Image (cartoon, helix red, strand yellow):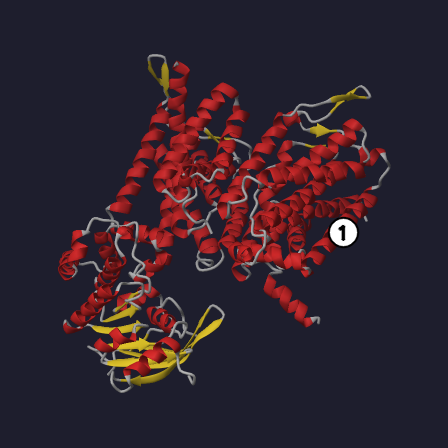
Amino acid sequence: MIDLAQNTLDGLFLGSSYAMLALGFTLIFGVLRRVNLAYGPAIMLGCYAATWVHLNSGAGLLALAAVAVLCTTLAGAYVERLCFAPHRQGSAIAAMVASFALWMQLEELATLALPRHIYPFPPLHGGTPLEFGALTLRVESLVMLGAAVAACAALWWILYRARFGIAVRAVIDQPGAAQLAGISVPRTFMLTFAMASAIGGLAGFLVAASHEQVTPMLGMMFTLKGLLAMMLGGLGSLPGAVAGGLALGLLEAHSQWFLGPQARDLIAYALLFILLAARVPWMTTRSAS
Amino acid sequence: MSLLGVEDVFTAYGKIEALKGVSLEVAPGSITCLLGPNGAGKTTLMMSIAGILKPKRGRIVFDGTDIAGRAPHAIVGRGVALVPENRLVFPGMSVRENLLAGAYQRGDKAAIEEDIERMFGRFPRLKERAAQFAGTLSGGEQQMLAVARALMSRPKLLLMDEPSLGLAPLVVEEIFRIVADLHKDGATIFLVEQNAHMALKVAHHFYLIEQGRISFSGTPGALAEDEVIRRAYLGSSRA
Amino acid sequence: MDDYAIGVLTNIGLVSFLALSAYLLLIAGEMSFGQQAFFGVGAYAGGILTAMYGWPLPLAALAAMALGALAQLLVGLPTLRLRGLYFAMATLAAAEMMRILFELVHFQRAIDGEAVGPDGTQGFRGIRWVFAHGVEPIEYLAIVYALLVLALAGFLLLERSRLGATLRGVGEDPELAAALGVDVNRCKLGVAAAAGALAALGGVLFAHHNTYIEPRNFDIMLGVHSLAYALIGGLGTALGPLLGVVLDIGALEGSRVFQGYRMIVFGGLVALLLVWRPRGLLDERTVRWVKQRFS
């Protein structure tokens, strides 16, 4: 029983990072109708940039977070200009393959700068975890959850209270009409990419700080988890991205505990496959041309 | 001095050359209609003026400047608003948000609110449904919403692409009554239609387009109405 | 020709089967992130049959192809009604599941006092049929390319046939094809079986060339790469994916200059290339142009 509760907690915290990754993917997919395979690597580049700064200066955590977010956003802008802007009215597949090419490029850039297999990253909180009876709560996890909530709140505010949000929702809802309403679609794409990159950069920073390390596997990991969570929650739905991320986290935490790491991944993929094959309504509503 | 001058425009739609040298004028303060059968190029012309399609050749002079090939949002900024074929409202956004979207380029919040009230005054049915998702509105209500959204940008020229499409006759009458009202309030309207009968009732000047070229230009009455209707639906044998 | 060059050329040939497998699915309108799994099925099946049960390579290869086809059908059936990104993600999920299964399989037999067989993440060593039977590297290269040429011949015949036109029709507009009386599902399943067999053939040859395989060989990177080869080389002809393979592996080996930052250069070039040529180098338009010039 305690195991169940502890795993659920751990799963929620894990799921918070997945939710943020999924939000980033979903923003790009919902607005641009494209899959960005360079999203994970851009975040990895941000993490690596923060690591580099950490190794070469005594910068504090907030500064490192800023570096991660900034570098991810810059990398994202680069990807947007090279892979997505040129194919805006053209082929979705060309954009995706181009983003894959940049995936390779960004990963190599990161590993050239920091070639070792593992680098230490400063923890968010050096102290002992909090204890509530038999349950353990790492402070990192609370921060992660808090950051995810804050990111969702900020995103919600932008989409529903800020003027720019109308542009984003209009492009998501009916791109043909958005132009006619005087909304600059290219500019909306750029700013959406920036938002997605910022959220991703924050997620990446928090993951690195939670694990207290960065490795070259981060790019692939961010991409896979983000894609998986996005699909589980229903492609193109922002609330779905959050739900999918949390669900994935919970699933992983529980299966890992009871069945080990390989089963954990196996179950997640099996679930996705079954849900897709069964074409459950919430997952297959949005056209993914 | 015409408000809009289309000069010898050629536009391709995919691989098809849909407009083969179209020239026409819209006088300020008038209601001008473009009639013609399906596939003649009416929508292509509208999209070319609105900037969604880029003409291969020719000029589109609006208020003294050539706007051909400019980005759609820039053209809206200059004062041209298109009510598209099939309405194209934002189905997942409320009626009010649809109107706000139409005013996207404007910064004057107070005036925008006033305009929204004015739209609600002109289209009471929209006011009833202000918080509803636009996707749940009926065809006629969506048409009104699309017109209201276009008006929110305070355009100098209002383009309307087949406003009667898919609507019941009573609703169509209402739409054209709105068109006449807008004109009375000083709007310049360029309207594309297949429903020649209704269009001729409001138009000051009309053009016939067939197979990508203008085949007739004149005032209602210059051509017998049944001749116009025939050519608007079927085209003439010599275009 | 030195051993190194033979090795590179053989590698190009092996990966080409994978690229052709992805290409076949692409022209039928399906984007698969999972062909690497069937490559793996072929590799493991072929290796098990020759190294553990003493089967001759040709027979093992045929059996591996059959298994590859079956495996791809098992994935293709439940996903028949999926399109675009949904289909792609389903194939990715299936492929990762298979890779994890490879990690979980421990199945060994004692052969001459040694344990031979797949050993989970430790991999599967000792697939030595080729060497045990005295096949020289250059002879193996010839075999690989002979089979590749056969496959290409098959593709070129397909392109000219009505079946090929039907497949491209299904790929471009399945509803229209169905309205014209094409049994779209049967086409898709047929393509799936063929693609699975092709990938598995590449896998068998790969396993026997390397003598050692491990689950990590068959990860997502390999799959996305094989898809990319087809999309970069061009979708107009079966030579397109081959061009993609040659460009990538050729760039890997040929770019001593760019040692260490090969992907930085190559990745950027590919992205730029796609701006100019969204459907790849040898896209349909180019192929038509070439055909016109030579007829």
Please state the horizontal and vertical placement of residue C190, each as a whole percent of the image.
Answer: 64, 47
In the image, A14 versus A246, the foreground residue is A246
| Quadrant of the rendering where the C terminus of chain B is positioned | bottom left
SS label for mark 1? helix
In the image, A180 versus A80, the foreground residue is A180
Amino acid found under the numbered disc labelled 1: Leu
Left or right, B178 with reference to A232: left
Q: Which residue is mark 1?
A: C150
Please state the horizontal and vertical placement of residue A133, each as a whole percent of the image.
Answer: 33, 12
| Quadrant of the rendering where the N terminus of chain B is positioned | bottom left
Q: Compared with residue C176, is residue C291 higher up or lower down, i.e. above or below? A: below
Chain hosting mark 1: C
Q: Residue furthest bottom?
A: B222
Left or right, C247 with reference to B43: right
* Residue under the image location 32 percent in, 51 percent down: A168
In the image, A120 versus C98, the foreground residue is C98
* Residue under the image location 22 percent in, 55 percent down: B100
Left or right, C33 with reference to C124: left
